[in-house]
Every structure is written in structure tokens, then in C-alpha cells.
Amino acid sequence: MDKIEILQYLTRAACFSLLSNGELKLYILLLVSASDIDAGAEINLKQIAEANGAMPPLSELRAMMSTLERFGLAVLEDIRGGAAAGVLCYRLTRPKKHGEARWQKR
């Protein structure tokens, strides 16, 4: 499944309407920044801040990543450094079909 197929899948998936604008923006940014699916990747927090207009608090960033992980889209591996020079380490995952009960937002 390449990146275009992932975006096509996501727009048809039940979780699409459950993701917030911030979560969608973050996922698209991670998708664009990753070199491959199921491989470790890094993105500068500065890039996330630029795409968002401001840097979300790290707790909010972790919460957004938790949502992406719950929906099988990406996994947060680490956040290193501070907000100005930090790096978010993550891994995109191949979306899997889930039962509707798993897609319910908490």
C-alpha cells in the first residue's frame, strides 16, 4: 500500500470523520515526511509548528499520536529535545480494517 492508496483508504474509512482537524493535519504531515511505511521516521517539531501555525503542547501532540495509533495509522516512538529543536520519532503503519466498535472516539 503506497501513500496515495493510504490516503484513499483513509477518506473511505470510518475513522476519517472521527479524526480532528489537528489529527488529520498531523497525519498528512507525517505521511508526507516518511520515507516508507512500517519504517522508523523523524520530523522536526519546528515543521509541525509551521504546519499548525503554532506548536501544540507536547501533551496534545502525544494525545494526537495516541489517536492515530488507536486507529492503526501511526505509532509514536519518542519525542526528543525541546519544542524549538525537538524531533518526533514515529512509524507509519499499514491501515487495517477494524470493526466499527474500534473506531468509536473516546
Image (cartoon, rainbow, N blue to C red):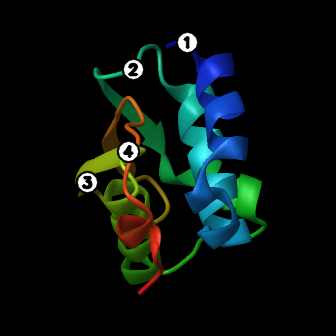
Instruction: Inspect the image, locate mark 2, and give the three-letter code of the amino acid beneath it.
Output: Ile
Instruction: Inspect the image, locate mark 3, and give the three-letter code of the amino acid beneath it.
Output: Arg
- The percent coordinates of residue 79 (x first, y second) are 28, 56
Residue shown at the point (46%, 77%) measured from the top left: 104
Residue named by callout 4: 74
Residue 80: give its label: 3
Near-viewer residue (16 or 20): 16
Residue named by callout 1: 2
* CB-based contact (under 8 Å), mark 2 and mark 1: yes
Vertical arrangement, residue 82 with respect to residue 97, above or below: below
Residue 37: give its label: 2
How far is disc 1 from disc 4 in space, using C-alphas? Answer: 14 Å
Tell me the element at label 1: loop
Q: Counting residues from the N terminus, which is met first, the one under dot 2 or under dot 4?
A: 2
Instruction: Inspect the image, locate mark 1, and give the three-letter code of the amino acid beneath it.
Output: Asp
Vertical arrangement, residue 19 with respect to residue 12, above or below: below
Disc nearest the viewer among 3 and 4: 4
How far is disc 2 from disc 1 in space, using C-alphas? Answer: 8 Å
- The percent coordinates of residue 29 (x first, y second) are 63, 41
Tell whether 3 sits left or right of 40.
Answer: right
* CB-based contact (under 8 Å), mark 2 and mark 4: no
- Residue 67: quadrant of the picture: bottom left
Near-viewer residue (36 or 96): 96
Q: Counting residues from the N terminus, which is met first, the one under dot 3 or under dot 4?
A: 4
How far is disc 2 from disc 4 in space, using C-alphas? Answer: 9 Å
Mark 1 neighbour density, 10 Å: few (under 14) some (14–19) many (20 or more) = few
